[in-house]
Image (cartoon, rainbow, N blue to C red):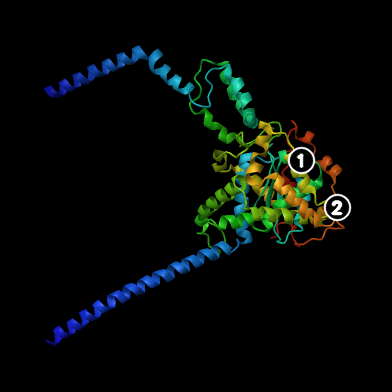
Amino acid sequence: MRTLKTICILMLAIATAAPAFGQLSSVMGKIGDKVQKGKQVLDIYTPWTPQQEEQVGQASAARLINVFGLYENSQMVRYVNLVGSTVAQQATRPVPYRFGILNTEIITALSLPGGYVFITRGALAHMNSEAELAGTLAHEVAHVDQRHLEKEIRSQKQMQFIKDQTAQFTSGQLEQLTSNSLDKALSQQYSRDKEKDADRLGVTYAQKAGYQASGLRLFLTMLSEMPKTPETQRQLGLWGSTHPPLPQRIASLEAEEASLPAGGQALAARFSQHVSPANFAAKPAEVAKPATAQK
Amino acid sequence: MTISAAIRGTLTRTAGVIALTLALISPAGITGGLMGQQNSQPGQQQNCPAQGTQNNGQQGQQSQEGQQNGANNGQNNNCNQPAPLFGGALSIKKSNQTTDSAALGFNGVDPNGQVQQAFLNSAPSADSEKKAEAMAAYRPTPAALVTFEKDGGLTQSATPAAAGAAAPNGH
């Protein structure tokens, strides 16, 4: 009789506790979700380490070089690196910037994490001064300095597997990050804010480095005045799909320049001396490895 | 044994009929049909004289043409030969040009100036990886940078913001 009573009490207790347990597990589940979301937010806002930046940048650069090839004229590569490094000194983060010339007639410039900045042979052939080159490279340096590409990638849902504690990305992660970096850099626009930010900072870097602040604007103006032919459509297609419309940027740059001190160097003669369109025509490439020139 | 012999006899007769049929239709039938399929593939030439025209239309792939011309010339000289079945896909490996003369064109972009995904998705060659490494290692020396700035009259207004930005291999 006593045993029966105990069993009854136990059953009653279990019956009463079951809903409570259910509620508890539901609450625990919700807490787990919140923690997971918190982790994801942390991942989005935790910047990559220099090693991770370098890893993604170099792997993406290799793929980019695989598509376009590098223009291996050691004198011109050195010149572009000197101009780029001059403006990069004005950036806020100590990133090891390196500048390459992509061997294609399309007109564009782009940057990858880790300080890999590229300008195309086509873009160089359409520039008239060192200030224009400096302004264009400074815009790309600003993208790297502000981690624009990295931020866009980190904000993507599928990229949230990446943990900041990882010293180096695994090969699978790197593959995914490389694809995303190139997809972003070559087929999508940064947000309008990021582009405006890069234009503003780029002009400032170029001006502080001693160049005319109008360099980038003059180059964009020249691009906007190019005749609309299938040839130019092909040359500017990538630029158009990855940057805001030229008239908007030109107007915005003009306003930015007005707030900066006048003066600075254009260095058109030095530019012509190093970058002549004639150099691009049917001249055998110099095979000297840039790495052997200066380290 | 009797059933087995009957089956064997039937198989032999069937094989004989198939062989005879093949011998009769192969010159103009089966082979001709396959060649017709090859010629009608997109991106391949319908007839030999049209090849030049098609290449002219592909202005953007001038760089690829440099390497492809050899193969195309071979086809021109031998118009009766069927075009290679998978010839169209070979261009993926040919977007990467390193010499000026071979790459006076738009590597890897379509007529709208967009990068072709096929090129973008292809794994980099060992050569491309080496070039990326070489690019990573290359940086002007601080002394060369100072000289460059001085020569261009840039140093007076230049005020480095990030010390070590141009330091070799420094993060």
Q: Is residue B46 left or right of residue A75?
A: left
A285, above or below B43, in the image:
below
Residue for point 77% across, 55% down: A256
Residue A18 at what x, y percent from top left? 28, 75
Tell me where residue B167 sits by quadrant: bottom right
Label 2 vs label 1: CA separation? 20 Å
| Residue density around tag 2, few if under 14, some if 14–19, many if 20 or more, within 10 Å | many
The local secondary structure at tag 2 comes to loop
Tell me where residue A105 sits by quadrant: top right
Image quadrant where one finds the N terminus of chain A: bottom left
Residue A133 visible here: no
Q: Residue furthest top?
A: B24
Q: Is residue B59 left or right of residue A156?
A: right
Q: Earlier in the sequence, mark 2 or mark 1?
A: 1
Residue for point 58% across, 64% down: A46
Q: Is residue A13 left or right of residue B27?
A: left
B88, above or below B52, in the image:
below
Q: Chain of mark 1?
A: A
A141, above or below B53, in the image:
below
Q: Amino acid at mark 2?
A: Gly
Residue A118 is labelled as: none
Residue with the mark numbered 1: A222
The local secondary structure at tag 1 comes to helix
B92, above or below B159, in the image:
above
Residue B4 at what x, y percent from top left? 15, 24
Residue with the mark numbered 2: A264
Q: Amino acid at mark 1?
A: Met
